[in-house]
Amino acid sequence: MSERLQEFREWREQMNARILEAENLEIRRFFALDSRVYDERRLDTRTKELLGLVASLVLRCDDCISYHLIRCRESGWEPDELMEALSVGLVVGGSIVIPHLRRAVELMDELDDPDPSASDPPGGDR
Amino acid sequence: MSERLQEFREWREQMNARILEAENLEIRRFFALDSRVYDERRLDTRTKELLGLVASLVLRCDDCISYHLIRCRESGWEPDELMEALSVGLVVGGSIVIPHLRRAVELMDELDDPDPSASDPPGGDR
Amino acid sequence: MSERLQEFREWREQMNARILEAENLEIRRFFALDSRVYDERRLDTRTKELLGLVASLVLRCDDCISYHLIRCRESGWEPDELMEALSVGLVVGGSIVIPHLRRAVELMDELDDPDPSASDPPGGDR
Amino acid sequence: MSERLQEFREWREQMNARILEAENLEIRRFFALDSRVYDERRLDTRTKELLGLVASLVLRCDDCISYHLIRCRESGWEPDELMEALSVGLVVGGSIVIPHLRRAVELMDELDDPDPSASDPPGGDR
Amino acid sequence: MSERLQEFREWREQMNARILEAENLEIRRFFALDSRVYDERRLDTRTKELLGLVASLVLRCDDCISYHLIRCRESGWEPDELMEALSVGLVVGGSIVIPHLRRAVELMDELDDPDPSASDPPGGDR
Amino acid sequence: MSERLQEFREWREQMNARILEAENLEIRRFFALDSRVYDERRLDTRTKELLGLVASLVLRCDDCISYHLIRCRESGWEPDELMEALSVGLVVGGSIVIPHLRRAVELMDELDDPDPSASDPPGGDR
């Protein structure tokens, strides 16, 4: 995993811990729910993560896309399957999602070939 | 199928035909693409329709939700599986999607038990 | 209360009950959370309902605006105070929220002077 | 002009008057600004109305689309020019704007051939 | 105040000045209105800033959240009160607002304990 | 052109090439359509680019705004004309678009006076 990605995950974990220690009951419950809703029941986690990915793409949230991309890869989806899921999000959400698609594809490449010498993107919504 | 649903489908078909006869090449291509993107390739149509449903829910478009709900039922998803897909959209999109969830569930019931005496909802974003 | 408003509330209650009977644990938990988050803790319910109203306005959800308007009136906010809260939402959200503002103001008038002979609006996102 | 369209315009005028009589200074100023921003300065009103139309389409507000469509026709844009402007909004905003495109095209037809016997659409976000 | 925060405020002031010197009357009026709408009238500034904060959270604009967080702290809201306001925005807006919540909480901590050695977040929508 | 801008364009080109080599037919077709929809037909490219700019502003996508700003300048729009188009987007989209307006104006200045010593903005949604 590249350094940038590693930093993102660490910062994410650290802030989640910080938020949960804030003693706000509703936020804690929301975080618990946000985790449980991807559990296998009638649909498997794999399918639900794909739903989370496309929902994140059309809502144009880079951090959410990154999170679900990582989880989708971990649950066994192949890059070309993910690309096809992203194509559905692209048609639903329009050209406005293209910058997020670029960053999603870059992350996918990084996940599969985590060359630490890879150049960072210059800014972007990320 | 209830009368309301039948009217929706007919109006939808009629307007699509009207739009396509307008001789606008880009709109025609977009409509073709919007149809093809749900074709089976690496992912099956069934999975892609579920992606379309959840994307429509988080973007809060009732007509789009209705369309994908019908297609999801036709491609074999069961009501409790669809409810679970909708639960992912609810957590991603928040309480703001609840009014659309209500109308989605009402439509699902209508699709399975198309009692023509069922009362119409009073207005709604639909 | 006008007939239209009464119908809206009844349909809303009926669909909420329908959704909760669906045995989907995450949806049930979300609905419980959506209710509890407005409970008095460090902020009072009155303030939180005002937050819910303005959030609903900028996200442009008529049903949500209606719900929070009713709750805001019940928790003691006066019409001109609500109008001022809506003015913040108007400046944040821009002219795109004006149609929702129109329907919000119409509902406020209806809540205070529920003349059943009042004419219905012709359609609208509601 | 069809009856439905006439009712929409009257209700709109009536609610605008109601909102402006509410003695909220910021809302009044916003409404004045919302009118003035389409005045001819370096860009002509005609161009600005087209910008308002496409902005309304991608933000998916039917009432706003209707308003700007009427103003665009009044300022001299032809139906096929408007269709081309809408095609830009369709590609930017994606398939999620299609229901609004359908209602926009229906309204355009109504504006040009206001046959009062035309059937109303069954509900819709309008 | 940390260096990062100081830079943000300076860049913000500088660009606002640059925009206002552009001699565009409507933009100037909008900026004036955007300032005045938070003035005390029937609601106090403190309440209106809280409305601005939650509206910014559900619309997912980091710069707007930062601005209103700073103003909320200056007008006397305590961190746990702000956390509770943010919890309303989280439930209304869904898990898609969580990345913005993380950055909001980080900024709140920075405002209260402006340790200049604190590490910057790795990118993010900010 | 400043270094930052040059890097943005190069990264953008590189990722577009990467996406198109992915052998996903629908994504390729969407990209082709996204290019063609700005071609001159009944409306000229110049007008369509202005539509793309304002659509990008109200949808709050910095990369899209940057792209269309560059294209608008290339197709002959003057800075004060662009500012006026942006003022329409500001009124339609509200104060939530102001951070994007700041970055748009900064880019416009950069395009006209590409001083490489200009300081970078501290983060932002970009």
Image (tube, coloured by chain):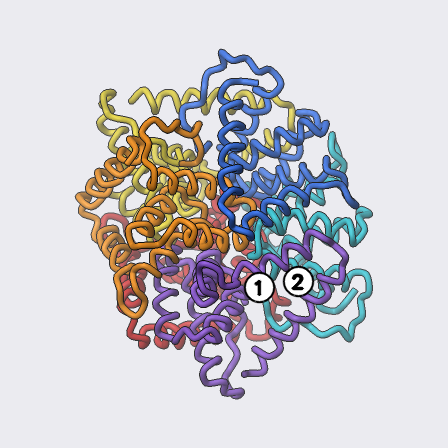
Chain colours: A red, B yellow, C orange, D blue, E purple, F cyan
| Near-viewer residue (A111 or F98) | F98
- The residue that label 2 is drawn on is F103
Q: Quadrant of the N terminus of chain C?
A: top left
Q: Position of residue D108 (x, y in %)?
A: 59, 24
Label 1 residue SS: loop
Label 2 residue SS: helix
| Near-viewer residue (F67 or C78) | C78
Question: How much space separates mark 1 and mark 2, taking CA atoms?
Answer: 9 Å
Name the residue rendered at 18%, 47% in the picture.
C23
Q: Residues within 10 Å of mark 1 (few under 14, many from 20)?
A: many
- The residue that label 1 is drawn on is F125
| Near-viewer residue (C108 or B113) | C108
Q: Earlier in the sequence, mark 1 or mark 2?
A: 2
Cβ atoms at labels 1 and 2 below 8 Å apart: yes
Name the residue rendered at 58%, 59% in the picture.
E34
Query: Label 2 amino acid?
Result: Arg
Tell me which chain the residue with mark 2 is part of: F
Q: Is residue B87 visible?
A: yes
